[in-house]
C-alpha cells in the first residue's frame, strides 16, 4: 500500500514512500531525478504508483528521517467543506439550533489559509486571541489533474490521493465572526495540519463503498485519550458532489486541497455539553486512521 510523503533533505525536500515501518526514496525506486519528481509529482505518481508497492532495499533511507512535511509538493489552495450532517447537527444542538434547511441544497465551503499548513509532529502555536481552541478531524483530498466543471461521476479522474487533516479552530472567535455574516477568518487561518502520508488514488479505490464514499476511519485523541471516532462512509455530500461544486465555473489545479469538513464526533465543540475542556498549551492532539497513519501535533 503506497503511502507517499516528504521529508527534509538539505535545503530542500525528498519524496519518500512508507512501507511496514521503513521509508524509501521514491526517486531511487523510479530512477528519476528528485527535481523532476518534485516538478511532475502528480503525473509521475499516477503512472508509477504500482511500482512503489515493492520498493527494494536499494532505495531504503537508512539515516534518521526527521519530521514529516505535509505530503504534497505545494498546497495551492484549501477549500474546506461542511459535508457531514452528524457534525452539523451535533454542533448546532449545543446552541439549541437545528440543521438549517439550506444546508441540504448543496455542499458549502470556505477558503482556508494555504500558507499556514503544518505537518506531522510540527508544533501548533496557540493563538493569543482565543480561549476556546479546538481540533477538527477531517480528510483532505488532493487534486492531481487540472479540471473545470467536473461532473460528479468523473471525480476519480482528478484525485491524486487523500491524507488526514486537522482544521484547528478558535471557537469563540469563529462564533463572533459568523454572527457578523462573514468568516470563519481569524477563527481558522492560523493553522491546518496535513499528514502524515498521502494514500494514493489507486489504493484509495480499494476502500470505495459507492460513488465518492470510502471506508476510511478517523479517531481524534488528546493526550492519548480517544475523544471521538467516525468513518467517511457516513458523509452526506459525497466526494463527487464536492468536486462538482468546487469546479463549477472554476478551474481546479494540481495541489488544490478539498477538505471534507469535520466528521461526526470529530471535535470538542460537539462534546462541549459533556464537560470536555478546550485545548490548552502542552496538549498533544492526534488524528488516527488505520488506512493512513497518525497525524500528531503538540499545542505550544
Image (cartoon, rainbow, N blue to C red):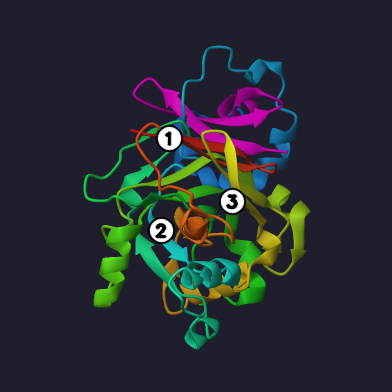
Residue sitting nearer the eye, 273 or 2: 273
User: Along the polypeptide, which appears first: circle 1 or circle 2?
Assistant: 2
Mark pair 3, 1: CA separation: 26 Å
10 Å crowding of disc 1: few (<14), some (14-19), many (20+) = some
x and y percent of residue 269 in the render?
46, 58
Q: Nearer the viewer, residue 229 or 69?
A: 229
Image quarter where the N terminus lies is: top right
Residue corresponding to mark 2: 78
Does residue 271 appear to the left or right of 230 in the view shown? left
Position of 177 with respect to 259 (left or right) is left
- Residue bounds of the magenta highlight: 1-30
- What mark, if any, has residue 283 been given in the picture? 1
Looking at the image, is mark 3 or mark 1 nearer the viewer? 1
Dot placed on the residue nearer the N-terminal end, 3 or 2? 2
What residue is shown with label 3? 162
Residue 239, quarter of the rendered image: bottom right
Q: Considering the numbered disc 3 on the image, is that residue within a helix, a strand or a loop?
A: strand
Residue 191: in magenta span:
no
Q: Residues within 10 Å of mark 3 (few under 14, many from 20)?
A: many
Residue 123 coordinates in the image, percent (x, y): 37, 33
Any part of residue 294 in sight: yes
Decide whether the magenta segment is chiefly helix, strand or loop.
strand
Amino acid at each position: 500500500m503506497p503511502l507517499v510523503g516528504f521529508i527534509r533533505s538539505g535545503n530542500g525536500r525528498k519524496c519518500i514512500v512508507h512501507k511496514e515501518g521503513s521509508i524509501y526514496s521514491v526517486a531511487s525506486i523510479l530512477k528519476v531525478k528528485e527535481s523532476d519528481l518534485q516538478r511532475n509529482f502528480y503525473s509521475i505518481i499516477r503512472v508509477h504508483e504500482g511500482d512503489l508497492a515493492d520498493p527494494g532495499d536499494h532505495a531504503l533511507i537508512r539515516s534518521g528521517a526527521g519530521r514529516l512535511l505535509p505530503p504534497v509538493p505545494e498546497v495551492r489552495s484549501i477549500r474546506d467543506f461542511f459535508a457531514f450532517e452528524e457534525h452539523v447537527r451535533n454542533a448546532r444542538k449545543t446552541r439549541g439550533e437545528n440543521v438549517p434547511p439550506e444546508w441540504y441544497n448543496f455542499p458549502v465551503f470556505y477558503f482556508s489559509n494555504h500558507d499556514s499548513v503544518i505537518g506531522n509532529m510540527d508544533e501548533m502555536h496557540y493563538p493569543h486571541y482565543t480561549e476556546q481552541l479546538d481540533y477538527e478531524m477531517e480528510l483532505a483530498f488532493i487534486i492531481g489533474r487540472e479540471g473545470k466543471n467536473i461532473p460528479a461521476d468523473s471525480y476519480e479522474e482528478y484525485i491524486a490521493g487523500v491524507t488526514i487533516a486537522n482544521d484547528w479552530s478558535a471557537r469563540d472567535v469563529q462564533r463572533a465572526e459568523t454572527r457578523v455574516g462573514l468568516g470563519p477568518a481569524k477563527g481558522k487561518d492560523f493553522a491546518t495540519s496535513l499528514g502524515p502520508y498521502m494514500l494514493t488514488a489507486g489504493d484509495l479505490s480499494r476502500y470505495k463503498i459507492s460513488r465518492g464514499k470510502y471506508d476510511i476511519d478517523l479517531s481524534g485523541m488528546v493526550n492519548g485519550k480517544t475523544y471521538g471516532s467516525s468513518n467517511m462512509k457516513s458523509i452526506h455530500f459525497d466526494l463527487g458532489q464536492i468536486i462538482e461544486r468546487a469546479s463549477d465555473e472554476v478551474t481546479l489545479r494540481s495541489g488544490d486541497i478539498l477538505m471534507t469538513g469535520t466528521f461526526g464526533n470529530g471535535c470538542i465543540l460537539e462534546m462541549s455539553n459533556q464537560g470536555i475542556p478546550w485545548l490548552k498549551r502542552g496538549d498533544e492532539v492526534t488524528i488516527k486512521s488505520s488506512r493512513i497513519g497518525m497525524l500528531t501535533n503538540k499545542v505550544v
